[in-house]
């Protein structure tokens, strides 16, 4: 059998392929960082177990004359307070007649204080706390059993102590732990591929619909909210009051429509807001919850532009945790009714995304080992950093951009330095393109200097989506973290953000396949000229092969 001509034909094809310039590869790059504020240096022993302790202090209320100051004490159950006093060095308050135990708030303004703390409120004759600082003590029979120091109080902030550290938190801000649910399934989806998931989740409610977001401009979402209200579903909406760039006239009209329909719409804002931005994107629909990286707008949940990630869960602990988060955020002074907030305000014009995209990754219901609800500023960053620090094999991250000095970006570099393969996919949208190119270069240089396995690329949508807006990570091919958190310190420490950490092989495989496709972008597409040349080569092979077969028949 003659074989000579066939290898020659294939060799010609291989030679042709070898002369084609390689597609641009990814480049190593990584994040910058956020800010963290530490306002005071504390000196607290923090009482524990068998004796009273100082838990918190609120020295600088917004009200005139600082009316409503209070201090929170831990008074252990079963402990006698005979001979026990609280003092700031000037005023001494006997505690012997305090019958309450547990968390107790001492105040001279009990009516103002009751809606500022969950502690049992106890009225005292005189409690005056200096904004410049105090040295607080609890004495039992002239022995100091606990003490705490603060300086330069922040207005409308509550101080708590954690060992030698003092934390100032806006009054009314939550301090929620991570909430974990084991087992079960989640519906995983991405945008713009599956825009029907979000709308169908909120469309079929029967009892309650709590929708939280940064902005809301999607008419389909508004229609679903109004329809639910008309079915006597309890519908509540909570948004950011002052989104970056302002609110559009379209968005304002939509919120007006919701209010006119009888729906409660509140926005978080004002000089004493608990969070810099209410940036969370989620909804609680009866006994289900949906958490997204995308805004409730045509370009986001509508599927007309952004690459986004989302998940729907019916795990009761997670759903209940989100509902509790919504109630806490919507129930404070800075959550203002929209009709009041909009008075005297002007709104911006805005464009509406209308592009359409094919479905490459349909939604999938997949099993999970566990789902953990995370929120900022309460707990998300510490859990995320710990997850990155525990990575053994791989970390894949998709973000609009990152802050080089952030705790999350620093954790990525630590992972890469110890041999974990790190891939960071950033947006190539016009508004971050140049900054991300510089960031990529910085990470390239860092990775080369440190011989680290860290690669950074700017996304190539390749017609599959408009821009990257997702905020997600896949760790060791078995953990997925997704939600509203941009990887910078301001978002992690000052915003309200909501995330889910999903553990399980199947859920990691789903988002991993999407990430791999987005990482490749258009790099796998073969140019038309090359396709034509390859077809020519294949034709030559067929012809030559045919001749050989004919001659040897």
Image (spheres, rainbow, N blue to C red):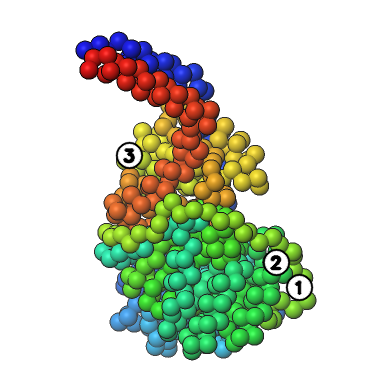
Front-lying residue, 330 or 172: 330
Query: In the rendered structure, are the residues bearing label 1 and label 2 in contact, judged by CB atoms less than 8 Å apart?
Result: no
> Residue 159's spot in the image, x, y percent?
53, 67
Q: Which structural element holds mark 3?
A: loop
Front-lying residue, 20 or 435: 20
Residue 146 visible to an observer of this rendering: no
Query: From mark 1 to mark 3, how far is it between C-alphas?
Result: 51 Å
Nearer the observer, disc 2 or disc 3? 2
Query: In the rendered structure, are the residues bearing label 1 and label 3 in contact, judged by CB atoms less than 8 Å apart?
Result: no
For label 2, count other residues whose C-alpha is less than 10 Å away and answer few (under 14), some (14-19) or many (20+). Answer: some
Picture disc at residue 393: 3
Query: From mark 1 to mark 2, how far is it between C-alphas?
Result: 11 Å
Displayed quadrant of residue 101: bottom left
Instruction: Answer left or right for 34 relative to 342.
Output: left
> Residue 374's spot in the image, x, y percent?
42, 62
> Residue 16's spot in the image, x, y percent?
46, 19
Picture disc at residue 248: 2
> Residue 170's spot in the image, x, y percent?
57, 68
Q: Which structural element holds mark 1?
A: loop
Instruction: Answer left or right for 202 relative to 505.
Output: right
Query: From mark 2 to mark 3, how far is it between C-alphas?
Result: 44 Å
Q: Which residue is denoted by mark 1 in the rendering?
A: 345
Lower sequence index among marks 1 and 2? 2
Label tally:
3
Q: Residue at x 69, y 60 (%)?
A: 351
Q: Residue at x 28, y 60 (%)?
A: 367
Quadrant for the N terminus, please: top left
For label 3, count other residues whose C-alpha is less than 10 Å away and answer few (under 14), some (14-19) or many (20+). Answer: some
Please, is residue 470 above or below residue 201 in the view? Answer: above
Lower sequence index among marks 2 and 3? 2
């Amino acid at each position: 059998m003659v074989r000579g001509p066939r290898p020659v034909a294939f060799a010609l094809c291989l030679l042709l392929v070898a002369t084609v310039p390689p597609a641009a590869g990814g480049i190593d790059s990584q994040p910058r960082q956020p800010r963290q504020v530490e306002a005071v240096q504390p000196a607290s022993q923090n009482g524990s177990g068998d004796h009273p302790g100082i838990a918190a202090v609120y020295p600088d209320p917004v009200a005139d004359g600082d009316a409503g100051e209070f201090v929170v004490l831990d008074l252990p159950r079963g402990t006698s307070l005979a001979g026990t006093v609280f003092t700031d060095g000037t005023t001494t308050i006997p505690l012997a007649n305090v019958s309450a135990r547990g968390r107790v708030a001492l105040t001279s303004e009990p009516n103002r204080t009751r809606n500022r703390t969950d502690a049992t409120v106890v009225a005292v004759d005189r409690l005056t706390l200096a904004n410049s600082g105090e040295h607080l003590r609890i004495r039992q029979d002239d022995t100091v059993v606990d003490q705490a120091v603060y300086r330069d109080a922040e207005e409308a902030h509550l101080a708590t102590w954690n060992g030698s550290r003092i934390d100032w938190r806006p009054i009314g801000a939550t301090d929620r732990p991570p909430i974990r649910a084991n087992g079960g399934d989640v519906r995983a989806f991405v945008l713009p591929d599956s825009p029907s998931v979000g709308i169908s989740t909120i469309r079929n409610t029967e009892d309650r619909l709590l929708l939280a977001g940064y902005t809301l401009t999607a008419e389909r979402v508004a229609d679903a909210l109004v329809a639910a209200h008309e079915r006597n579903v309890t519908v509540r909406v909570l948004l950011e009051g002052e989104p970056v760039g302002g609110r559009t006239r379209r968005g304002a009209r939509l919120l007006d429509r919701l209010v006119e329909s009888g729906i409660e719409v509140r926005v978080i804002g004002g000089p004493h807001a608990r969070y810099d931005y209410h940036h969370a994107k989620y909804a609680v629909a009866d006994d289900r919850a949906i958490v997204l990286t995308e805004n409730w707008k045509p370009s986001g949940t509508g599927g007309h532009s952004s690459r986004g990630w989302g998940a729907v869960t019916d795990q009761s602990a997670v759903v209940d945790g989100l509902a509790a988060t919504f109630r806490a955020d919507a129930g404070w002074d800075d959550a203002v009714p929209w009709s009041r907030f909009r008075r005297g305000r002007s709104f911006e014009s805005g464009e509406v995304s209308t592009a359409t995209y094919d479905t490459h990754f349909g939604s999938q219901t997949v099993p999970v080992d566990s789902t953990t609800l995370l929120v900022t500023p309460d707990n998300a960053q510490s859990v995320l950093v710990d997850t990155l620090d525990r990575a053994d094999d791989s970390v894949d991250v998709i973000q609009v951009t990152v802050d080089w000095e952030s705790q999350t970006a620093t954790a990525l570099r630590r992972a890469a330095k110890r041999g974990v393969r790190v891939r960071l996919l950033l947006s190539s949208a016009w508004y971050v393109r140049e900054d991300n190119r510089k960031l990529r270069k910085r990470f390239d240089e860092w990775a080369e200097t440190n011989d680290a396995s860290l690669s950074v690329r700017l996304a190539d949508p390749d017609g599959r989506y408009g821009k990257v807006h997702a905020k997600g990570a896949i760790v060791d091919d078995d953990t997925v973290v997704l939600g509203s958190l941009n990887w910078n310190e301001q978002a992690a420490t000052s915003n309200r953000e909501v995330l889910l950490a999903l553990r399980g092989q199947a859920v990691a495989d789903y988002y991993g396949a999407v990430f791999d496709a987005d990482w490749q972008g258009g790099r796998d597409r073969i140019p038309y000229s090359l396709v034509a040349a390859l077809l020519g080569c294949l034709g030559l092979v067929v012809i030559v092969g045919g001749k050989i077969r004919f001659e040897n028949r």
